[in-house]
Image (tube, rainbow, N blue to C red):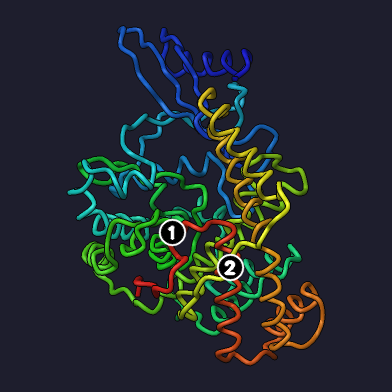
């Protein structure tokens, strides 16, 4: 619940920009690591009701996270995008220090669908989906053509493809967790850096889930806080990452379109050709980046920085992105090793967890609403992961140990995982069929525990190329 002081500050801010208007309601919509979003409802002096979106920095954060722009810079970028005919919300007013609300801005409220899993499925958007990939290509071409003024360029992160790979890999190494597929992917990326391109404005998070869509097409491109200067093909590759297809793996562009349509829209608008090899590189990088970022989110929970029930579950999503890297780089059969142990003593640990989960579902979940209901679903997902792990992990780890021993020698499981990681980092490991099979099976087994319904848990190779 929002406190009275905050509501009073918003009310004064609304009075400053809309004289003689009255604040009706403020609802918090999101609470990200660096920014918050609110829906603000106002009764104007003429009698009609208006709705707006307020974005501001998280209280207590004096500066944005590394690589993220501040809300005031984001507001400037939205205005630049609007001038370039990119569909975005109109910025109405920026906050100033006297408002007491921190760094932020008020923008118009737009109506449309923003949930990625609904965009790929809603019957009323069927005709829209047919042209959506082409529209995405057009919108990205317009973003990349924006002439960024020097004052904004000076505050944007600028990084080369190689620098971005190394930054991401170093962030993973600092987490001190042995994930061989991440190291394998990092080495592949460093060997396949695309030719240097001109630095353009890159949105940084252009994907299904950050688009507002209506039956008329793209209503707005949202969430500009990861804008930077770099290779524009990164945006196209990120849009094709399987994590943002919401189960529609056969449609590589956001789960709603084809790569050919995306490229056609981009080339028609920009007049430049898209290198499919570079696009493939950035799709691989996108899954690599997400596999590391999810682990980093879990680490912020461990340190107490973000004590949310969501963060540990998000950390388990690393296996999803790692499996996507498997399909992109070393496709092949993955099979299924999940066989429950023969348990005769009841109740087992997994059954105890299962009983708690069933109780929460049947006796608690339906009595909750809003954020409480959402967070309980997240907690139940954590219990489901723990249940599968208790049931299957001993067998899976025994199989992993046998494969590792054949690859890198004797030792316990933790030792051999690190031994393989160090061999990959030093490039002293033979990249042969045995290594590839081990990586495929290990990541697939981990994913079967973490998220058995994820679309990459098949042997079908990526269709994004």
Mark 2 Cα-neighbour bin, 10 Å: few <14, some 14–19, many ≥20: many
Residue 161 x, y percent position in the rendering: 53, 72
Residue 219 coordinates in the image, percent (x, y): 29, 41
The earlier-in-sequence mark between 1 and 2 is: 1
Count neighbours of disc 1 (C-alpha within 10 A) and say few if under 14, some if 14 to 19, many if 20 or more.
many
Left or right, 4 with reference to 210? right
Question: Where, by quadrant of the figure, is residue 174 drawn?
Answer: bottom right
Vertical placement of residue 371 versus 72, above or below = above
The foreground one among 376 and 137 is 376
Q: What element carries label 2?
A: helix
Image disc number at residue 312: none
**Residue to which mark 1 is pinned:** 201
At x 62%, y 23%, the residue is 100
SS state under label 1: strand
> Disc 1 to disc 2, how far (Cα)?
39 Å
Q: Is residue 188 above or below residue 388?
A: below
Locate the N terminus by quadrant. Answer: top right
The single residue placed furthest to the front in the displayed view is 344
Between residues 402 and 231, which one lies in front from this camera angle?
402
* Percent coordinates x, y for residue 233 in the rendering: 40, 68
Name the disc covering residue 445, or none: 2
Residue for point 67% across, 52% down: 298
What residue appears at the point 35 percent right and 71 percent down from the top-left corner? Answer: 464
* Residue at figure coordinates x 37%, y 60% from the top left: 144
Q: Looking at the image, is 359 positioned above or below residue 432?
A: above
Quadrant in which the C terminus is drawn: bottom left
């Amino acid at each position: 619940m929002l406190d009275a002081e905050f509501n009073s500050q918003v009310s004064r801010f609304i009075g400053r920009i809309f004289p003689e208007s009255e604040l009706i309601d403020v609802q918090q919509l999101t609470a990200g690591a660096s920014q918050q979003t609110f829906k603000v409802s106002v009764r104007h002096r003429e009698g009609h009701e208006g709705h707006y979106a307020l974005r501001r920095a998280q209280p207590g954060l004096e500066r944005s996270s590394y690589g993220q722009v501040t809300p005031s810079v984001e507001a400037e970028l939205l205005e630049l995008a609007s001038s370039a005919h990119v569909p975005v919300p109109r910025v109405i007013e920026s906050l100033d220090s006297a408002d007491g609300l921190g760094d932020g801005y008020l923008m118009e409220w737009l109506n449309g669908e923003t949930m990625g899993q609904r965009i790929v499925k809603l019957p009323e958007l069927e005709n829209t989906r047919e042209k959506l990939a082409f529209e995405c290509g057009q919108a990205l071409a317009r973003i990349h053509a924006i002439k960024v003024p020097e004052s904004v360029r000076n505050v944007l992160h600028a990084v080369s493809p190689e620098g971005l790979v190394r930054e991401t890999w170093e962030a993973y190494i600092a987490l001190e967790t042995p994930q061989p597929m991440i190291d394998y992917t990092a080495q592949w990326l460093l060997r396949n850096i695309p030719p240097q391109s001109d630095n353009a404005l890159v949105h940084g998070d252009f994907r299904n889930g950050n688009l507002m869509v209506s039956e008329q097409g793209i209503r707005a491109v949202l969430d500009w806080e990861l804008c930077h200067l770099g290779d524009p093909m990164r945006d196209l590759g990120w849009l094709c990452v399987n994590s943002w297809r919401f189960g529609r793996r056969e449609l590589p562009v956001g789960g709603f379109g084809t790569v050919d349509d995306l490229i056609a829209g981009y080339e028609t608008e920009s007049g430049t050709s898209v290198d499919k090899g570079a696009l493939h590189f950035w799709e691989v990088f996108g899954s690599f980046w997400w596999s590391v970022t999810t682990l980093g989110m879990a680490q912020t929970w461990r340190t107490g920085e973000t004590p949310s029930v969501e963060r540990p579950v998000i950390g388990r999503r690393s296996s999803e992105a790692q499996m996507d890297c498997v399909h992109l780089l070393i496709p092949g059969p993955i099979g299924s090793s999940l066989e429950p142990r023969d348990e005769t003593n009841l109740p087992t640990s997994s059954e105890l967890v299962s009983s708690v989960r069933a109780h929460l579902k049947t006796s608690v979940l339906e009595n909750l609403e809003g954020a409480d209901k959402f967070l309980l679903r997240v907690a139940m997902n954590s219990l489901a992961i723990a249940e599968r792990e208790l049931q299957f992990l001993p067998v899976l780890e025994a199989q992993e140990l046998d494969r590792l021993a054949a690859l890198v020698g004797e030792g316990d499981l933790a030792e051999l995982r690190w031994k393989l990681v160090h061999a990959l980092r030093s490039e002293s490991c033979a990249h042969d069929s045995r290594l590839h099979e081990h990586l495929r099976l290990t990541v697939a087994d981990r994913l079967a525990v973490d998220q058995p319904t994820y679309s990459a848990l098949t042997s079908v190779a990526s269709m994004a190329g």
